[in-house]
Image (cartoon, helix red, strand yellow):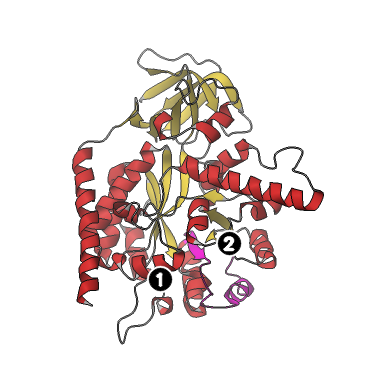
Amino acid sequence: MRRTLIKSATIISMDEAIGDLATGDLLVEGNRIASVRPSIDVAADTEIVDGTGRIIIPGLINAHMHTWQTGLRGFAANWTLLEYFRRMHSGLATVFRPEDIHIATLVGALNQINCGTTTLVDWCHNNPTPDHTDAAVRGLIESGIRAAFFHGSPKPEPKPGEPHFSEIPHPRREVERLLAGPLADRDGLVTLGLAILGPHYSTLDVAAHDFRMAHELKLIASMHQGGGPAKTPGGWDKLIAAGLVGAGINIVHGNDLPDDLLDRMVELGVSFSVTPENEMIQGHGFPITGRLLKRGVRPTIGIDLESILSGDLFSAARVALSMQRALDNAESRKTSGTIPATTTIPVREALRWITTEGARMLGREHQIGSLTPGKLADLVIISASDLNLFPVHDPVATVMMQTSLANIEAVMIGGAWKKQNGRLLVEGLETKKELLTQSGRRLVQDIERQGRAA
């Protein structure tokens, strides 16, 4: 069995029973964490990694990203949400070929590993054919990242005689095909979830169909909530009355949810994924981070769209933390005339959003999210002696408030190194980058050509 021992590192376990170790050792055996202690002795055939001047944290969990848009990085940076609906879903998305989905998903997932993400929730909603779906799944598998592939559906404007996408139930046959094929292993490196429309973007009949299917197949059902008026006003009340809302339902965004409905969702065990930077950029509204915390639940954090912003999950968590602290400070000034006596959200709380809470949302807290013996060996090594991090007074603060891509020295997924010495361990990266460039260029040219023809 392969063994790796990381010695003399600062360890942030995110496991309350273990806590933080100012200096400690972490042993990996096979694909799992075997031990986390101040000092560990091992056999001579163990790989020894010097952790001096380094911080080890659990692998990050990106709870929401449309990875198929990687080839369009920055292209939509100046679009509002309304422009995005029109120009992406009704425009650019319609000219994607399976090979475009494949290379975007592959390179996007590799970049996530490079940034310290070990588990990616790939919310794929541009898959008009099984070939598009298979191309996305293949990209995730080839990247080596741990992923939850949330199977979605495209949202083009209907042609004459075609139904609107809001009237089309999620394709059960396609979901069952994936469960019988490449995503059959519920504990595999890449697993399946559903990216459904929900009552905000579909008719009540479609929403009920999709919720029931997710429950029957024991799959997480994730849906966008917000962005203009709901397709089915009052739809959530009807779904709750029918007993279809509970654990396994994941809300993305949720900025406009009224307090009473949010209360009911929290009581029913619904999870929430916030994409703070993009929500504020595109016009969704302020993230619901603080509203959730007041109700005793934590958000998960996602990137959302690399067509608009960076894929760095540390940055997204910092935006969520900073925005909510700002809102809390402003509220305190308004009600008491002064800022709070101490911060309302400590930095460790933000680190939970991108580690343990992501694992909980996926129902995999027994496998990932913390550096706990017995869990899968998904971890990140940060070079704490780098100029922008040194000296380290509070390791958690260093991780959350100072760390960037430049400091991610190594990444391990399931006991296997995916990045070492600051370099991704992937063959043919330059060729992959060139394929992504060609794909992005062709997509833009194709949609511009369509525009001229119209």
Name the amino acid type tagged 1.
His
Q: Is residue 120 visible?
A: yes
To which residue does mark 1 refer? 170
**Region in magenta:** 218-246
Name the residue located 20 percent from the left edge and 59 percent from the top edge: 442
Residue 229, disc: none
Q: Position of residue 228 (x, y in %)?
A: 52, 71
Q: Which residue position holds label 2?
A: 255
Residue 133 locus on image (x, y percent): 30, 60
Is residue 386 left or right of 98 when viewed as pictured?
right
Of residues 318 and 19, the one drawn nearer to the viewer in this rendering: 318
For marks 1 and 2, give the CA distance. 25 Å
Rendered view: 216 above or below 99:
below
- Front residue of 288/281: it is 281
Is 238 one of the magenta-colored residues? Answer: yes
Residue 258 position in % (x across, y down): 65, 67
Q: Is residue 101 left or right of residue 338?
A: left
Task: Determine whether 12 is above or below 362 in the image.
Answer: above
Which type of secondary structure does the marked residue at label 2 adopt?
loop
